[in-house]
Amino acid sequence: MRRDKEEILNVMNERLTTLMKMHNLDVDSFAEKCGIEPENFRAYVDGTKEMMIPELVKISKAMDVSADYIMGYYTYPFPVAKTEEEYALYTKLDGMSREELKEFADGLREKLSEHEA
């Protein structure tokens, strides 16, 4: 899947905005939490400045979300994979629809309930 620069910047803008909402942070608070200058972060969000890899890594670590999500390669905001197994799991889960994910989660809850009983 080849995407142009503008599409990538638009997706990153959407994902950064989503992360701010998920964590209930405004632009300045989000930037501070990530260790990025607020002016630079605002420019990343509005698409007037390209984010460099060090900033992407800072955001990924501070928000515990994969860079793949921020760049639009994952649909869901999975945490940073710490093992190859986690990476494989997140990749598989990302290929699922919301309905399939719901069924998967319900199945896990059921198995946990049985195990706890």
Image (spheres, grey):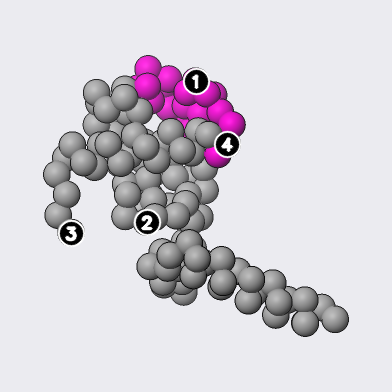
Q: Amino acid at mark 3?
A: Met
As measured in the structure, the alpha-carbon distance from the residue carrying label 4 to the one carrying label 3 is 30 Å
Residue 90 visible (yes or no): no
Q: Can see residue 82?
A: yes
Question: Along the polypeptide, which appears first: circle 3 or circle 2?
Answer: 3
Secondary element at tag 4: loop
Any mark on residue 1, and which? 3
CB under 8 Å between callouts 3 and 2? no
Q: Position of residue 28 (x, y in %)?
A: 49, 20
Q: CA distance from mark 3 to mark 2?
A: 13 Å
Q: Which residue is mark 4?
A: 23
62 vs 116: above or below = above
Q: Amino acid at mark 4?
A: His
Which element carries disc 2, helix, strand or loop? loop
Mark sitting on residue 112: none
Q: Quadrant of residue 25?
A: top right
Give whichever of discs 2 and 1 has the lower sequence position: 1
Q: Residue at x 14, y 54 (%)?
A: 2
Which residue is most to the front? 99
Whether tag 2 and tag 4 are in contact, CB under 8 A, the answer is no
Q: Position of residue 57 (x, y in %)?
A: 39, 43
Mark toward the viewer: 1 or 4: 4
User: On the image, numbered disc 2 is attached to which residue?
Assistant: 74
Q: Which residues are magenta?
A: 22-42
Nearer-N-terminus badge (1/4): 4
Residue 78 located left or right of residue 6: right
Tell me: 13 left or right of 78: left
